[in-house]
């Protein structure tokens, strides 16, 4: 079992960690080629379609939109509710066979399938077939199988005492859940109790993503390297990546707590018996400056930042892995880009204040928020 905080002050005082390697190619994204005029509240999911339009979810507005950057037009898809063609707290958007899209309907604890005509055609439960937990997929493959992490509390009494969590794959056709690989998972707080955040922020944990051919890619936090695992079991381990650990500041704690609360859900406030999870967004009263400061003061944080953030890594259409580097507050976002051998080959830098929300065939999509809290969607040519 690894210690709760694998990064210590000794790391900060030591030279950068990692083996010497050729410097990655810089990829600066300085300005968008298009910005949608539409005002969003909280962009949660995005998927680029074949014709260049994008599907976008706004979680707080509880809307799915079809957006056209050429015309600037944004059109609603479906509506709020618990019936056919409806959703509640729309989240991630993932590719689905038949040129369709899978929508994670968080509030109704189900998945909705958006057809190539951009209409919701059907839905099915997100309840796992092997236990009393909900699947929250971050990837699908070409066969329509879903990839997710089994919560430690649902993995059995022996697994809950370890640091590992399992990446799993669900086949909707057979209803079979298959465990694929183990990760060093999120660290539980001392005594297993945390006031608001159910894990220790900034504690090092592995990251992962899955691809259309059934491959799994894992980003290891202990020494920052990438492992590619093909569907036939072949494993390619990349070299260690140089990084410098950073101390967690008070500003880091407050900023992390605010971001967590803005994107979290609260139970018992959803759509009743039709939604097993009964989820709704955290109310505004719990997101004031005073509430955030109080919550940050009562939570346990790791003393050092890990090499990469807890943003979900992304696979580009050509198969490169993007991992967001951990940097001081106020820095321009930087994403490390790895090839299929696990080598760091490039580093993409976004303008300050941007949040990467999607990678398309020819474009990168980012969200930016103004002083009033309104978000806009930007497109950058790749």
Image (cartoon, rainbow, N blue to C red):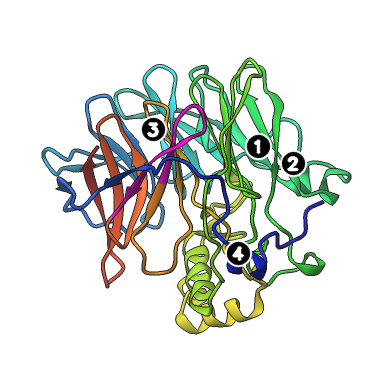
User: Foreground residue, 267 or 168?
Assistant: 168
What residue is shown at x 18% (from left), y 52% (from top)? 31
Q: Which mark, residue 14?
A: 4
Location of residue 175 with respect to 182 vertically, above or below: above
In the rendered structure, the answer to whether residue 230 lies left or right of residue 41 reads right
Mark closer to the observer (3, 2): 3
What residue is rendered at 46% in x and 50% in y? 89
The secondary structure making up most of the magenta span is strand
Q: Secondary structure at mark 3?
A: loop
Point out the tag, 1 or 4, that comes first from the N-terminus: 4
Q: Which residue is mark 1?
A: 127
Mark 2 surroundings within 10 Å by alpha-carbon count, few (fewer than 14), some (14 through 19), many (20 or more): few
Q: In the image, is residue 337 part of the stretch drawn in magenta?
A: yes
Question: Position of 225 compared to 285: left or right?
Answer: right
Q: Are marks 1 and 4 in contact (CB under 8 Å)?
A: no
Q: Is residue 323 above or below residue 3?
A: above
Nearer the N terminus, badge 3 or badge 1? 1
Q: Is residue 83 visible?
A: no
Q: Is residue 53 above or below residue 269?
A: above
**CA gap, disc 1 to disc 2?**
7 Å
For marks 3 and 1, give the one nearer the viewer: 3
Magenta stretch, residue numbers: 336-350
Residue at (75%, 32%) from the top-left corner?
Answer: 130
| Name of the residue lying farthest toward the left | 71
* Residue for point 53% across, 67% down: 246
**Residue 302 vertical placement versus 349 (above, below):** below
Q: Going by the picture, which residue comes out furthest to the right?
A: 158
Residue at the spot of label 3: 316
């Amino acid at each position: 079992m690894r210690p709760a905080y694998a990064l210590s002050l000794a790391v900060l005082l030591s030279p950068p960690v990692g083996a010497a390697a050729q410097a990655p190619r810089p990829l600066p994204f300085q300005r968008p080629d298009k910005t949608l005029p539409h005002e969003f509240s909280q962009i949660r999911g995005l998927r680029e379609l074949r014709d260049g339009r994008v599907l976008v979810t706004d979680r707080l507005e509880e809307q799915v939109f079809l957006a056209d950057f050429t015309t600037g037009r944004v059109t609603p898809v479906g509506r709020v509710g618990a019936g056919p063609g409806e959703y509640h707290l729309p989240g991630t958007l993932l590719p689905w066979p038949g040129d369709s899209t899978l929508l994670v309907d968080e509030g109704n604890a189900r998945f909705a399938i958006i057809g190539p005509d951009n209409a919701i055609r059907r839905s099915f439960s997100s309840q796992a077939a092997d236990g009393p937990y909900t699947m929250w997929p971050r990837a699908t493959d070409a066969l329509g199988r879903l990839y997710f992490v089994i919560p430690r509390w649902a993995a059995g009494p022996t697994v809950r005492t370890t640091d590992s969590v399992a990446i799993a794959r669900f086949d909707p056709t057979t209803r079979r859940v298959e465990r694929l690989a183990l990760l060093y998972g999120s660290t539980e707080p001392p005594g297993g109790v945390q006031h608001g955040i159910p894990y220790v922020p900034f504690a090092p944990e592995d990251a992962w993503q899955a691809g259309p051919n059934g491959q799994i890619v894992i980003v290891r936090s202990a020494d920052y390297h990438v492992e590619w695992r093909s569907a036939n079991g072949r494993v390619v381990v990349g070299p260690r990546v140089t990084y410098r650990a950073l101390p967690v500041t008070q500003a880091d704690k407050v900023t992390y707590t605010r971001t967590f609360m803005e994107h979290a859900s609260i139970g018992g406030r959803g759509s009743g018996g039709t939604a097993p999870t009964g989820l709704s967004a955290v109310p505004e009263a719990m997101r004031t400056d005073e509430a955030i400061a109080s919550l940050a003061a009562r939570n346990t944080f790791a003393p050092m930042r890990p090499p990469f953030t807890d943003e979900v890594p992304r696979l580009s259409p050509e198969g490169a892995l993007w991992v967001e580097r951990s940097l001081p507050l106020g820095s321009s976002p930087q994403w490390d880009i790895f090839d299929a051998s696990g080598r760091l080959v490039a580093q993409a830098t976004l303008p300050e204040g941007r949040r990467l929300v999607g990678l398309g065939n020819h474009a990168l999509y980012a969200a930016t928020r103004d002083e009033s809290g309104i978000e806009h969607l930007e497109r950058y040519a790749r």
